Amino acid sequence: MSAPLLQVVDLVKRFPLKAAPFRRRAVVHAVDGVSFDLAAGETLGIVGESGCGKSTTARLLMHLIEPDEGRILLDGREVGRPNGVPMAAARRAMQMVFQDSFASLNPRLTVEASIAFAPRVHGVAEPEARARAQDLLRKVGLDPARFAARYPHELSGGQRQRINIARALALQPRIVILDEAVSALDKSVEAQVLNLLMDLKRELGLTYLFISHDLNVVQYVSDRVMVMYLGKVVEIGPVERIYGATAHPYTRALLSAMPTMDPAHRTAAPPLQGDPPNPIDPPSGCRFRTRCPFAEEVCAAREPLLQTIDPAHRVACHAAAAGSGHSRATALAAAA
Amino acid sequence: MSAAAPSMDFPVAAAAAQGYWQGVFRRLLRDKVAVACALVLLAILLAAIFAPYVAPADPAKGSILKRLQPIGAEGFPLGSDELGRDMLSRLIYGGRLSLLMGISPVVFALAIGGFLGIVAGFVGGRLNTLIMRTVDVFFAFPSVLLAVAISGALGAGIANALIALTIVFIPPIARVAESVTTQVRGLDFVEAARASGAGAFTIIRVHILGNVLGPIFVYATSLVSVSMILAAGLSFLGLGTKPPDAEWGLMLNTLRTAIYIQPWVAALPGVLIFVVSISFNLLSDGLRSAMDVQR
């Protein structure tokens, strides 16, 4: 089998905080050893509470910030290294759509100029860049004759987000990172933009990294889902396994907090209490143990590693790993 | 706005910027106060430029017999000064130096301070600390004191007064430029431009300048009046222009002794300084609101 389109290996990003004099410099582990693969043509959803490192991961992938450790491989070749994929090529292959549709467009540029900017930077001639911008406007469902010369403040939120999508597609990327790209839109517009994204994916053969806190949307668009907690991946697997055969207590808590229209599936489990622990000083062992209903001694003693519990379904939890010493894992093994 | 030309340019972006400034101009025309101020300034500016054609008499020729004539006296529409020179002509000629001293330090400071502030704001980190703390040292002095100290050290004269005033205005402009740039740099569209692989220079030119120059320019316009008053102050103290040159601040100084004899004539240079400053201030206010349509 050929290498996956994108491989992320042990990505680490720490943000140092302003230290008080004579004290140990505090460090936030925003992303702490994240690894995953992205196969061509799939949509990987990333979910988690705010502050869990979803957006930092996206910014690391885009090289907007430099990772402290870890490697990013495109087609099996490392990005930004000699003999690897040059940065410019990686930029063309990967683009991003931001959450705030207004802040992500230059208010002084027309829509057409905003879309044509990236191709111009990559040396596409002016008339061709404009033609490409107009073509992209058509692709995202906006008539170039009406919209090309407009400014961002003359557009609605949904229209602006379509422009942002067009801008991201202007370099003909293979991977598009959607960082909460539809979260700020109202529901009807959100559905339209989601359908547009699905159409574009099919038409252009794109691969999506779909970051969201909206579990309904993630379930709708994703092939696989990755759940993050405090800078770590706690569970990753096919969407039907994550939503159907949930293995991690944190994922279960997230899902139980998910609003549903079906009275038969009404939330029964109590929602998670409190905030995530301080990422400057995370708990020992399993980072979720302070809020986990099944926490035992082993959880404080050892950090759970990602274990394969089903082909393509991996989870980092002692309770799900046979032989971990956790009472539920032992019971699980006995039942099997 | 046109920073040194790089290998490629962005006519699309340029066209967009043009459309924006046309809109600003249209909205400015709807602002009655701003238009009135612009007309007043234009009239004073034109009169100063074409002074030899406009002024009724030689501003340097006086007659001791005709000194301190009242406003409306025969041959002296605005009276005469303490050496019997025609006030109207001197005010018209005086506008040349006064406007030069008011506008050019601000233009120079806009170029230098704007550059420093934008670089500090965009690069951030240590360079920002270095530039901004240095600027703060100058900012700590009261502007009048700084202007007097610098031009005192350099010696009297117009050129030195201009240098002193420029140095006085660099810190405030740099601060405004830095804070606006820092704000804009944090916005997602700059991130998106970085993600597209654009270099710092291209990002500044296409994405930062257009969003930053407006506020900096408006702020600089409001400094013109301060500059005029400071320049007048320097001349008043004998550090700027020297007699017999006509300059409003200097005229105010020399006529001060006549304040009990011809108070109205003695007040005229002050009136002009006031009119020009207030016009610049109101015009910059109008410009500010004309540019603020985004949100």
Image: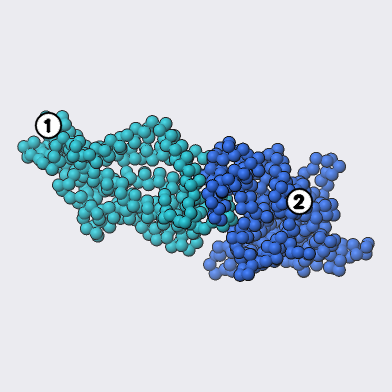
Chain colours: A blue, B cyan
Q: Point out which mark residue A318 bears.
A: none
Instruction: Identify the residue position indicated by label 1 in the image.
Output: B75
The image shows residue B191 at horizontal and vertical percentages of 57, 54
Instruction: Identify the residue position indicated by label 2 in the image.
Output: A222
Q: Residue furthest right?
A: A335
The image shows residue B220 at horizontal and vertical percentages of 37, 47
Q: Quadrant of residue B73?
A: top left
Q: Amino acid at mark 1?
A: Gly
In this orientation, does residue B237 appear? Answer: no
Query: Is residue A292 positioned above or below B54 on the image?
Result: below
Q: Nearer the viewer, residue B41 or A300?
A: B41
Side (left or right) of A172 relative to B51: right
Q: Nearer the viewer, residue A95 or B233?
A: A95
The image shows residue B48 at horizontal and vertical percentages of 24, 40
Element type at mark 2: loop
Q: Nearer the viewer, mark 2 or mark 1?
A: 2
